[in-house]
């Protein structure tokens, strides 16, 4: 009987340790995905960046200004080239609109199109305005990947049921000592790699350290990639709330 009690106590201790470690890993994963969601946003942000779209047959560059207020509001305006100048995108909560200056029309983007291409790039509408966040719309866990750097932490993110997210799962690699993402890999529901996003050239913008370059490579489209290069970035700044309005889509900032 004494041996049975000792074994039972030992098993209880092991179970407690496993639950404790699991809780710590869950908290760690939650903190990582929250920081990834918040990387280019913070409480508020302003950015000026260049987007270069590269295909086997042509290349083009866009110059874009962007503003964000938390995770709920985003506004972007294309400055160059002349053909697309003035085009704008507004996201408020889970609603998104595009403005086309040539026709002076505002178009609402349905949820089913959030995973569609933004301006012919390899980034989706959701990539740019972040309607879906890892923290709120995915389940996640810390995993190990054979052959990858042990200095990185890897988080597997699986979309919650009922959301029009096309990915089966996403794996994020993070340098946890600096809270800087290294890459994100996107897989379909069958586990096939669909695209890879790499974060490069880390710079300080004010007091915030972020990668100044993002390079997105689709796995199934040979010779294609889209590169975002930040020219300016400011965080935790005061913004006029009128920026994030339908009226501003036409008015222009």
Image: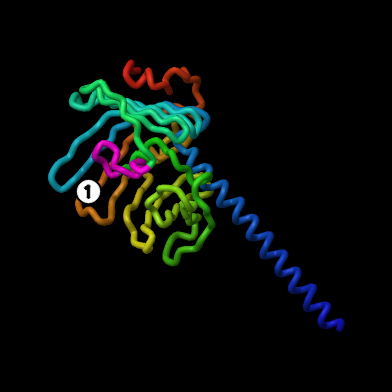
Reply above or below: 150 against 120. below
Is 116 part of what is drawn in magenta?
yes
* Residue 179 left/right relative to 74: right
Where is the N terminus found, in terms of image quarters?
bottom right
Colour pattern: rainbow
At horizontal 50% and vertical 50% (from top left) the residue drawn is: 138
Say if the magenta span includes residue 196.
no
Q: Is residue 91 above or below residue 29?
A: above
Question: Which residue range is magenta in the image?
Answer: 112-122
Q: Residue furthest top?
A: 251
Q: Secondary structure at mark 1?
A: loop
In percent of width and height, residue 182 lies at 42, 49
Q: Position of residue 183 (x, y in %)?
A: 40, 50
The spot of residue 207 in percent (x, y) is: 50, 31
How would you classify the magenta stretch by its main secondary structure?
loop
Q: Residue furthest right?
A: 2
Nearest the eye: 231 or 5: 5
Residue ID for mark 1: 224
State how many labels appear.
1
Residue 232 seen = no
> Within 10 Å of the Cα at label 1, are there few (<14), some (14-19), or many (20+) other Cα atoms?
some
Q: Quadrant of residue 186?
A: bottom left
For the point 36% across and 48% down, the residue is 198
**Left or right: 158 in relation to 199:** right
């Amino acid at each position: 009987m004494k041996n049975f009690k000792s074994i039972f106590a030992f098993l209880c201790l092991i179970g407690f340790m496993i639950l404790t470690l699991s809780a710590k890993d869950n908290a760690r994963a939650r903190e990582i995905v929250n920081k990834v969601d918040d990387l280019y946003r913070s409480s508020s942000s302003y950015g000026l960046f260049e987007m270069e779209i590269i295909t086997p047959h042509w290349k083009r560059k866009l110059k874009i200004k962007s503003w964000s207020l938390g995770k709920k509001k985003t506004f972007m305006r294309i400055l160059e080239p002349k053909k697309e100048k003035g085009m704008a995108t507004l996201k408020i909560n889970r609603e998104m609109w595009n403005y086309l200056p040539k026709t002076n029309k505002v178009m609402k983007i349905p949820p089913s199109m959030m995973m569609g291409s933004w301006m012919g790039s390899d980034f989706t509408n959701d990539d740019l305005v972040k309607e879906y966040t890892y923290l709120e719309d995915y389940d996640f866990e810390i995993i190990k990947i054979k052959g990858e750097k042990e200095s990185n932490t890897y988080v597997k993110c699986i979309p919650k049921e009922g959301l029009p997210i096309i990915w089966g799962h996403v794996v994020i690699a993070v340098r946890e000592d600096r809270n800087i993402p290294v890459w994100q890999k996107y897989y379909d529901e069958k586990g096939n790699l669909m695209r890879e996003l790499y974060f490069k050239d880390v710079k300080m913008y004010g007091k915030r350290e972020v990668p100044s370059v993002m390079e997105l490579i689709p796995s199934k489209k040979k010779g294609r990639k889209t590169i975002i290069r930040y020219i300016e970035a400011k965080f935790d700044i005061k913004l006029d709330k009128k920026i994030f309005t339908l009226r501003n889509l036409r008015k222009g900032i």
